[in-house]
Image: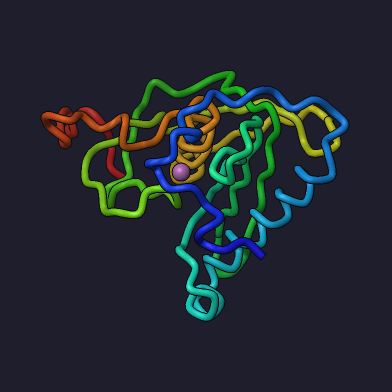
Amino acid sequence: MLKNKDILDENKKILRTKSTDVIFPMKQDDLNNINLMIEYLINSQIEDMCQKYKLRPGMGLAAIQLGIPKRYFVIVHEAEDSKFTNYVIVNPQIISASDEMIYVDSGEGCLSVNRNVEGIVPRHARVTVEGFNIDGKKIKIRAREELAVAFQHEIDHLNGIIFTDLIDKEDPFKDMNKYRAI
Ligand code: NI
């Protein structure tokens, strides 16, 4: 089982690496990691488990957050009460994005950022992501709102970008009226 300490903190330099494409077939280690990432994220979103194992609630994890510079990530999205959908995408690419921009009103979070960060992180309201599943089969996912934010956040990780980079340093709430709050 993954522990909090297995997830790298933002001060770790490796988080700034641009991860490289996965070559299929995927290695057993990577498949094991994916299962651990899914398990952590699901447990972290179930209150009892979250408390029992002292997890931090999270929706997504990229391989680089475990120190693995490969292009894959996991998102566990609670679409309705206690109904989780898992997304595992390998070598993802955003192939289209809406002009409309949004931001998470309560602020974005990240399991690698262990502090409260205020400010606007502009994101596309809708994105279409292409990539591969763990078997190397091509997949395409359309995401909107919260899920679209999660996809953009995780793809940023694969490029060495953390959400705090996208907040204006001088004026964290700059241009907030240009974007829709979610
Ligand atoms: Ni993150």
Horizontal relation, residue 71 to residue 102: left or right: right
Tell me which corner region of the image, top left, top right, bottom left or bottom right, holds residue 142.
top right
In the image, residue 32 sits, relative to residue 131, either above or below, namely below
169 and 103: which one is in front?
A: 169
The figure's colour scheme reads rainbow
The answer to whether 103 is drawn above or below residue 44 in the figure is above
| Residue 113 as seen in the image, left or right of residue 78 | left
The residue under the point 71% across, 49% down is 34
Residue located at (83% from left, 35% from top): 26
In front: 160, or 172?
A: 160
Res. 42 visible in picture: yes
Observer-nearest residue: 177 or 29?
A: 29
Q: Position of residue 162 (x, y in %)?
A: 40, 35
**Looking at the image, how many numbered discs can be counted on the residues?**
0
**Image quadrant where residue 53 sits:** bottom right
Name the spot of residue 41 as percent of width and height, x first. Answer: 58, 59
Identify the residue at horizontal 64%, vertical 30% (top origin).
Answer: 71
Q: Give residue 81's position: percent from left, percent from top.
A: 54, 69
Q: Quadrant of residue 11?
A: top left
173 left or right, relative to 164? left
Q: Nearer the viewer, residue 139 or 126?
A: 139
**Image quadrant containing the N terminus:** bottom right
Task: Pinpoint residue 66: horizontal percent, then vertical percent.
Answer: 58, 46
Q: Residue at x 44, y 41 (%)?
A: 145
Relative side of 74 to 179, left or right: right
Does residue 152 appear anywhere in the picture?
Answer: no
